[in-house]
Image (cartoon, helix red, strand yellow):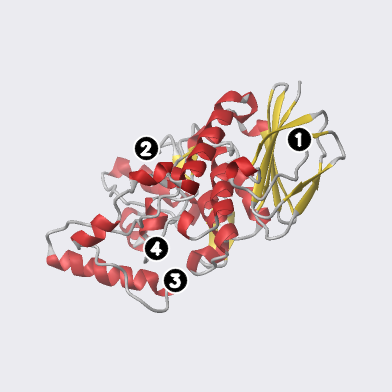
């Protein structure tokens, strides 16, 4: 399809520039609306090229895919392009995992360099309607990972330097699936959808068939179970989300600023995110591994722990990270956990 429109609109054959060239074709009166191109989106820029985007904000699936693959270990289809800790650090630092670099899944270069774009132009999540609805069984992330993994995913998004997006029900670990459903009246279109989805899932599911998107039962199965919000782990997870949001608002270092005010790094199974604003600073450490990870503090000053997902308050196995840290001291993180420190001023 992309090649067809490039030919029809006389668009330059450069994957990373395709969207912006397409937008420039507006002047020729030949612009067609295309949704969800897998080439890099055109971001709003002041420069002469690429400055015609309709969007001020852009969803970045790279963070979503990184969190998903690190926690689930899935590597089918496009998930095979992700799953390494250093890639998550890059996604946090640069918004993209692929910055016009080679993608094994696509077998070509992919991505773009957006280092000149402010963080507030990027929306990140751990799950959304596309990534869940386009799974054959519509499983939410909470149905694929442990409770510890759900907390880790929440923190990865809400402590990031970007705008967080929460998918309905994720804040309490909704158990209902979210499978794709439609109400089209055209039988040919419905059949095309059925065939298309069966083809789409061939890389992810060797057996089975997707739910009928036109069935009323498919829709009803996706309705939220609001009562879960106050039940057991669901209620604790909701409180954990609330605490993360509270910290994001309270700590100046966690406010959205610009790319000069944070640094992401990777060390074995541990990903770190150091954020600051003037004299205020915060340090988040994420352990996506299955073993205890250690980190020796390389930042100056005294740091006080503000959140630990392993704390019994959050139904964890028990916190082992120190309540305060000074340079060169070592902090230990249990498997699939995170800790947040604030620098004392």
Q: Secondary structure at mark 4?
A: loop
Residue 205 visible in the snapshot:
yes
- Which of disc 1 and disc 4 is earlier in sequence? 4
- The answer to whether the residues at label 1 and label 3 have Cβ atoms under 8 Å apart is no
Foreground tag (1 vs 3)? 1
Q: Which mark is residue 204?
A: 3
**Is residue 215 depicted above or below 96 in this figure?**
below
- Residue highlighted by disc 4: 135
Residue contact between numbered discs 1 and 2, judged by CB atoms under 8 Å: no
Mark positioned earlier in the residue sequence (3 or 2) = 2
Q: Are marks 3 and 4 in contact (CB under 8 Å)?
A: yes
CA gap, disc 1 to disc 3? 43 Å
**Residues at marks 3 and 4, CA–CA distance in whole angstroms:** 8 Å
User: Which image quadrant for residue 204?
Assistant: bottom left
Alpha carbon separation for disc pair 4 and 1 = 41 Å
Q: Position of residue 127 (x, y in %)?
A: 45, 51
Give 98 or 133, whichever is nearer the viewer: 133
């Amino acid at each position: 399809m992309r090649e067809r429109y490039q030919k029809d609109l006389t668009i330059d054959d450069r994957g990373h520039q395709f969207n912006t060239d397409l937008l420039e074709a507006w002047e020729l009166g030949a612009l067609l609306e295309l949704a969800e191109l897998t080439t890099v989106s055109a971001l709003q820029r002041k420069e002469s090229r690429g400055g015609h985007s309709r969007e001020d904000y852009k969803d970045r699936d790279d963070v979503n895919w990184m969190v998903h693959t690190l926690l689930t270990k899935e590597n089918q289809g496009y998930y095979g392009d992700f799953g390494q800790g250093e890639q998550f650090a890059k996604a946090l630092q640069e918004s993209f995992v692929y910055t016009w670099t080679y993608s094994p899944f696509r077998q070509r270069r992919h991505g773009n360099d957006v280092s000149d774009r402010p963080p507030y132009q990027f929306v990140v999540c751990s799950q959304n309607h596309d990534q869940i609805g386009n799974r054959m069984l519509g499983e939410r992330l909470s149905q694929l990972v442990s409770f510890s993994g759900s907390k880790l995913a929440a923190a990865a998004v809400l402590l990031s330097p970007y705008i967080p997006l929460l998918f309905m029900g994720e804040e309490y670990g909704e158990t209902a699936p979210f499978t794709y459903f439609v109400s089209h009246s055209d039988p040919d279109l419905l059949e095309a959808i059925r065939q298309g989805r069966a083809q789409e899932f061939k890389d992810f599911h060797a057996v089975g068939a997707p739910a009928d998107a036109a069935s009323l039962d498919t829709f009803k199965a996706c309705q939220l179970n609001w009562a879960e919000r106050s039940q057991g782990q669901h209620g604790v997870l909701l409180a954990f989300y609330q605490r993360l949001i509270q910290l994001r608002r309270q700590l100046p270092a966690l406010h959205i600023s610009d790319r000069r005010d944070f640094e992401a790094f990777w060390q074995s199974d541990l990903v770190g995110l150091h954020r600051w604003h003037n004299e205020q600073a915060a340090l988040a450490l994420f352990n996506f591994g299955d073993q205890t990870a250690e980190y020796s503090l390389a930042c100056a000053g005294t740091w006080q722990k503000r959140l630990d997902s392993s704390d019994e308050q959050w139904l964890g196995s028990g916190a082992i990270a120190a309540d305060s840290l000074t340079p060169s001291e070592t902090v230990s993180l249990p498997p699939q956990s995170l800790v947040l420190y604030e620098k004392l001023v």
